[in-house]
Image (cartoon, helix red, strand yellow):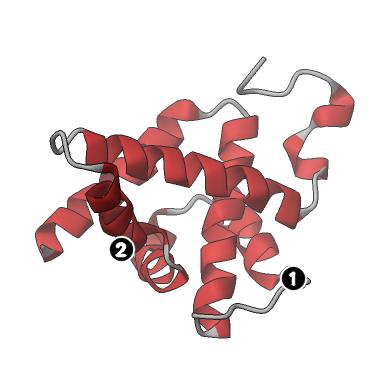
């Protein structure tokens, strides 16, 4: 039911970048929540506050700086499709450039998830969490 799409019509490369970002947002959030839960048994309020440091557009944009040199050609192309997609919404609490880069990252994660490339998502998120822990 979840993971790699099976039919030709369900090829992730045929989906719009914003549809991929929609899925990637969920994937990213799940990894962040898992990472935070693994840190200890905190209250839901503390978990939510901690998550905000990871899921805001500014943080995701900064993460792209770390990751972009590690992208394959295909990943770079998917990221750029998402980054350059025309969004119907305007960010309220973020710079447009940060919002676009965050959308690109979410697009890539959604693409990888729907392609069934769980190992690559694990690699990307491990790199991010390692980088975050270095900054703390």
User: What number is the disc on residue 53?
Assistant: 2
Give residue 17's quadrant in the image: bottom right
- The answer to whether residue 129 is left or right of residue 115 is left
User: What number is the disc on residue 87?
Assistant: 1
Q: Residues within 10 Å of mark 2 (few under 14, many from 20)?
A: some
Q: Is residue 73 visible?
A: no
From the image, which quarter does the C terminus lie in?
A: bottom left
Report the label total: 2
Q: Secondary structure at mark 1?
A: loop
- The answer to whether residue 94 is left or right of residue 129 is right
Query: Residue at the spot x=61%, y=53% of the render?
Result: 107
x and y, in percent, of residue 108 in the image: 57, 50
- The answer to whether residue 49 is left or right of residue 5 is left
User: What number is the disc on residue 27?
Assistant: none
Query: Residue at the spot x=54%, y=42% of the render?
Result: 26
Q: Earlier in the sequence, mark 2 or mark 1?
A: 2
């Amino acid at each position: 039911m979840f993971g790699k799409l099976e039919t030709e019509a369900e090829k992730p490369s045929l989906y719009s970048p914003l549809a991929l970002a929609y899925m990637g947002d969920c994937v990213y959030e799940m990894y962040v929540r898992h990472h935070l839960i693994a840190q200890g048994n905190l209250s839901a309020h503390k978990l939510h506050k901690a998550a905000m440091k990871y899921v805001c557009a500014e943080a995701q944009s900064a993460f792209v700086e770390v990751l972009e040199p590690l992208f394959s050609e295909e990943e770079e192309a998917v990221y750029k499709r998402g980054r350059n997609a025309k969004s119907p919404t305007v960010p309220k609490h973020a710079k447009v450039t940060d919002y676009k880069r965050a959308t690109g990252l979410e697009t890539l994660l959604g693409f990888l998830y729907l392609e069934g490339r769980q190992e690559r998502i694990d690699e990307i998120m491990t790199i991010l969490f390692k980088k975050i822990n270095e900054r703390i």
